[in-house]
Image (spheres, rainbow, N blue to C red):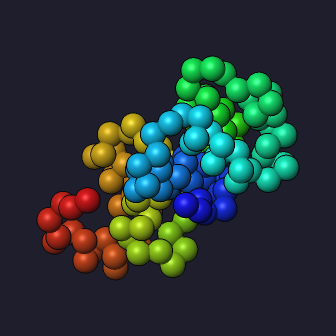
Amino acid sequence: MRLPPFWAKRPAVWLAQAEAQFTLVCISSEQTKFCYVISQLDQRYASEVEDIITCPPKRNPCMTLKTELVTLLSPSREQRVCQFLTLKMEGRKPSQFLRQLRILVSGVPDDFLRSIWSSLLAPYVRAILTGQPKGN
């Protein structure tokens, strides 16, 4: 089994891909998962979690490592809100733009998010979508 190269910009997505790979080949051992994950970290990221790599916890070493990587490398809530407030559609499809907004501010009520999203769309796109049923 080969994991894709570590994606530091989106560690939670990369870790979900790794978990899918583990499931496909029936790997359930925390220690085995831990070894696969650390094998994909380059020096820059391995040094950030050096304490966990050199002295892994006896219980749930992979879960501990995953939690720490996501905490260290994911943008803070404040950073995500700033990105949300400055995000532009920039050639994306409206559905892609909405998905990106949802990722940035997960937990925000969907009606509120759709209202913000709609206000950021070009007027001609809003006109087209007005007659469409609500979808995901």
Q: Please tell me in which quadrant of the rendered image residue 4 appears.
A: bottom right
Percent of width and height locating residue 57: 66, 21
Farthest-out residue, top: 58
Front one among 132 and 24:
24
Residue 85 seen: no
Q: Position of residue 51 (x, y in %)?
A: 80, 27
Tell me if I can see residue 56 in this picture. Answer: yes
> Which quadrant, please, contains the N terminus?
bottom right
Q: Which residue is nearer to you in this view: 94 or 60?
A: 60
Q: Is residue 47 left or right of residue 113?
A: right
Point out the image quarter for the C terminus: bottom left
Residue 34 position by quadrant: top right
| Vertical arrangement, residue 109 with respect to residue 14, above or below | above
Name the one closer to the observer, 68 or 113: 68
At a point 55% along the width and 48% down the height, the residue shown is 15
Residue at 50% in and 69% down: 89
